Image (cartoon, rainbow, N blue to C red):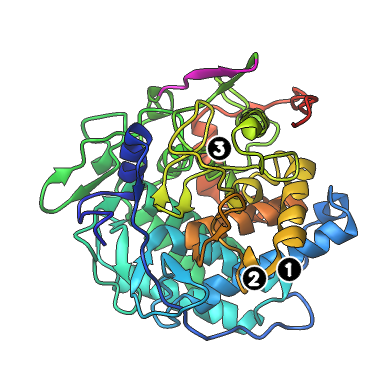
Amino acid sequence: MDWVGKKLTRRELLRRGACAGLAVPLIGSSERSMAAQATPKSASKPPAGAATTPFSPDDDALLQDLEKGCVQYFWDQADPNTGLVKDRCNVITPDKSPLGSIAALGFGLTGLCIGDMRGFIPHMQARERALNTMRFLWKKLPHHRGFFYHWANVNTGERLWDSEVSSIDTAILLCGVLMCRQHFLHSEISELALRIFERVDWSWLSEDTSILPHGWTPETGFLEYRWDNYSEMMMMYLLGLGSSTYPLPAVSWSAWKRVKFEYDDVEYIGSFAPLFVHQYSQAWFDFRQKHDQYANYFNNSRIATQVHRRFCLDLASQFPDYSEDLWGITASDSSRGYVVWGGPPATGPIDGTVVPCAAGGSLPFLPQETMQVLRNIKNRYGARAWGRYGFVDAFNPLTNWYDTDVIGIDVGITLLMAENARTGFVWETFMKNPEAQRGMNRAGFQPDTTPPPAPTQRGGH
């Protein structure tokens, strides 16, 4: 537990790691065997957009297997009574770590919806798990003004590691809560989801600032860091803007910076952070063909992903495993611990490690290029890089290192973006929430008919 040091948030770890380029020790986890029984048919059908999938039948079959494994993680690694999901697990050697992550739970609740829709989980079992989770979130999980503690005991909900009340991790959890509300259309789930969302006091978080803090602890008050630059936090501001009980002021959407970066004569909005910052908010909020006064963020993420691919190809002279068939670096495990790395600009001690969720979480942005990577990993590296829950968190072909762990949020972003790339199911379902629509309206989003950026033409090494 020393990598968090009892006071560090995951995002603070990323911030410090980006500055120092250091790795930190891995967390151990355990694996519970409570496998879901698949049903012959989906509980509900994919949206009509599924007919326009950009994937071949073989690629779609691979994504089906990948999604099934990801859903299995969120079923196996959650306590059936609390619904809380483990932060990570070792896929080879089970342990009994009770460490849960509320961010992993946000992805996990969405995973229940995908598992139900795809027929990976029987409908009644998926709905019961969602209902149990909503009841626990509303009645028992410790919170402060509606915001939840980052780390919790999966069996009891007890706060772990003196963790902070986390603004971004609560936002990820709320996205999963609202997703269940729209998918299951169950009266008690819907009522509890609304209560959980409306209890969150965004006005407290923004009482003296338009730039939201990373969190708060009862011991020290608000954390020093603020969400002041483009990152994964767009969902948080949009949820706050969409609240009908304690809304953020509209000015908060314009308060954070949108810094322009350039690589190889290509310009985009970015930050000194790993690739996931371009993925997380877009797992739920549908930014396609929309823009505010600053950008079309979906197109921006497409450009940022193209640029990251180029960046990896340009590293092939140092790390010959990187190619058009194998690229993608984002915050992940490494042979030296959990590392903050990516680029451009180059961040962290890049050593040739490949992180499958970098490509998996980018599937809607570059479907063919990312599918090429995932197909290559599955076919070339087999059981070393693929297991019960899909891809391992990271691996390095140059040193023959293969992770033994998967991480909930990395499994989650792969699952949600695979489904969005195939059918748009998460986008279509989540955006039915009036809170999501109101948030985007208050942020000033308008329809955008600008064509998406042209694909990168330059090849690899």
Q: Which residue is identified by label 2? A: 69
Amino acid residing under circle 3: His
The location of residue 186, given as percent across then percent down, is 56, 73
* Quadrant where the N terminus is found in the figure: bottom left
Residue density around tag 1, few if under 14, some if 14–19, many if 20 or more, within 10 Å:
some
* Residue at x-position 38% and y-position 62%: 101
Q: Earlier in the sequence, mark 1 or mark 3?
A: 1
Is 240 within the magenta? Answer: no
Q: CA distance from mark 1 to mark 2?
A: 6 Å
Badges 2 and 3: C-beta atoms under 8 Å apart?
no
**Vertical relation: 442 (above or below) 81:** above
Residue 308 occupies quadrant: top right
Which residue occupies 21% across, 47% down?
216
Nearer to us in this view, 258 or 24:
24
Q: Which residue is mark 3?
A: 278
Please state the extent of the stretch shown in magenta in the rendering.
Answer: 257-264
Tell which tag, 2 or 3, sits nearer the viewer: 2
Q: From what the image shows, is residue 334 above or below residue 226? A: below
Q: Quadrant of the C terminus?
A: top right
Q: Return the residue at label 1.
A: 65
The residue type indicated by label 2 comes to Gly
Q: Are marks 1 and 2 in contact (CB under 8 Å)?
A: yes
